[in-house]
Image: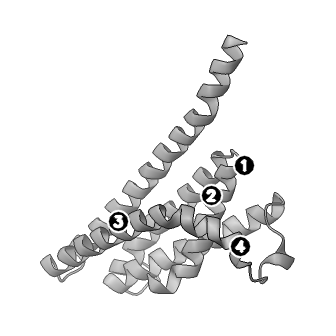
Amino acid sequence: RGLTFIPAVVATVGFSAFRGTMDVVTPLKITFFTQMLNVIMDPLLIFGVGPFAAMGVTGAAVATAMSEVAGSITYTIMMVKRGLLAITGIMRIPTWKSLQPLLIGGASVQLRSLALNVGLLSISRATLTMDPSGTAAAAHAITLNLWQLVGVVLLALSTTATIIIPERLNSAGA
C-alpha cells in the first residue's frame, strides 16, 4: 500500500476537484472502474487464473496497486481535459501560505483516514492469520472493494443531495 501512496493522493485530489466543481458523476464512474478492476484482478492474481501466476496475498496487493495507478492516471487525464489541471504546473512547489489552509482544513480528514486505515490493517492482519491459504484474504479483499464502492455511491448521493436540495428549495420559494 505504501508504494501506491502517490497514486492514492492523486486520486483523492482528483475526486475532490470534481466534487468541488459539483461534478459527482465523473468521480463515481472512475471509482466504479477502478473498484471493478480491483475486484476482477484480485481472484486472478491471488489464485492464478489463466496466464496469471498464483501470488496469494501478494496478488491482492498487486491488484490494489494496479487499480490505484489506473485511478490516478484516469483522474489526471480527466482533470487535464476539463481544464482543472495544467501539466506545466504539476512540478511547481506550492508556497507555505497556499498550503496552510489546506493543511489545517484537512487535518480532521487525515485523522479519520488514519484511523480507518489502522482499523482496516488490523482486520486484514487478523484475516491473514486465520487462513494461511489466502482464501479468506481474497474474500476479505473483495468485500472491502465492494464496501468502498458502496461508500462512494453513498458519498455521491449525499453530495448530490447537498447541491440539489437547497437549489430546489430556493427555486420553490422564489
Q: State the residue position of label 2.
A: 16
Q: What separation in Å lies between label 3 and label 1 (alpha carbons)?
A: 27 Å
Q: What separation in Å lies between label 2 and label 4 (alpha carbons)?
A: 20 Å
Q: Please report whichever mark, 3 or 1, sits nearer to the chain's N-terminal start.
A: 1
Q: Where in the figure is residue 46, as x and y percent of width and height? A: 35, 79
Q: Quadrant of residue 22?
A: top right
Label of residue 21 in the image: 1
Give the amino acid at mark 3.
Leu
Give the amino acid at mark 2.
Ser
* 48 sits to left or right of 41: left
Residue 107 vertical placement versus 168 (above, below): below
Residue 146 vertical placement versus 71 (above, below): above
Q: Please report whichever mark, 2 or 1, sits nearer to the chain's N-terminal start.
A: 2
Give the amino acid at mark 4.
Lys
The crowd level at tag 4 (other Cα within 10 Å; few <14, some 14-19, many 20+) is few
What residue is rendered at 43% in x and 64% in y?
39
Q: State the residue position of label 3.
A: 116
Q: Please report whichever mark, 4 or 3, sits nearer to the chain's N-terminal start.
A: 4
